[in-house]
Image (cartoon, helix red, strand yellow):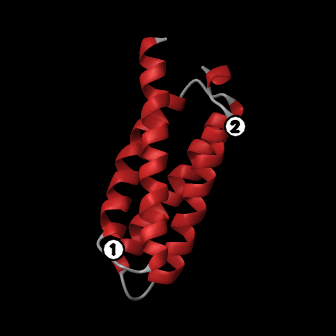
Amino acid sequence: MADQISQSSVDIAVHCAHECEQCANECLGTMSECARLCIDCSQMCWTCAAYMGRGSRFIPQVLRACIDICEACASECKKYSDNHCQKCAIACRRAAEEYRKIVLFAAVA
């Protein structure tokens, strides 16, 4: 499985984590649910990047959990017109899509 994960998959996870951190910082104190979800999502995406980077055998399990968190974060951020929220929602949806591809590949491999 590890050889099937490209550097771009890791980069997508890192990008999502970064956008979520930026959004959480902007939303702290004003949009608490958005900030909480962004922190959760950032933490999980960093974890996904680490698991993928080292080729862990638990990648599919970690990614499955992160898909749900990314979708929840994207849905919450999409509610707001702030640029940081919109960028975060896009990054989360992209990450969830990438994670789904990897999990699907693992299921048929």
Q: Secondary structure at mark 1?
A: helix
For residue 72, side relative to residue 55 (left or right): left
Q: Which mark is residue 81?
A: none
Q: Is residue 97 above or below residue 32?
A: above
For the residues labelled 1 and 2, say whether their Cβ atoms are less than 8 Å apart. Answer: no
Q: In the image shown, does 40 or 100 lie closer to the viewer?
A: 100
Q: What residue do we see at 31% from left, 67% from top?
A: 76
Residue that mark 2 sits on? 7
Separation of marks 1 and 2 at Cα, in angstroms: 31 Å
- The type of residue carrying mark 1 is Glu
For residue 68, side relative to residue 62 (left or right): left
Q: Is residue 50 above or below residue 54?
A: below
Q: List the single residue furthest toward the top.
A: 109
Q: In the image shown, does 86 or 24 lie closer to the viewer?
A: 86
Q: Is residue 33 above or below residue 9?
A: below
Residue 88, x across and y down, in percent: 47, 65
Where is the N terminus found, in terms of image quarters?
top right
Residue 42, x across and y down, in percent: 53, 59
Q: Which mark is residue 33?
A: 1
Residue count near mark 2 (Cα–Cα under 10 Å), binned few <14, some 14–19, many ≥20? few
Residue count near mark 1 (Cα–Cα under 10 Å), binned few <14, some 14–19, many ≥20? some
Q: Earlier in the sequence, mark 1 or mark 2?
A: 2
Q: What residue do we see at 46% from left, 83% from top?
A: 28
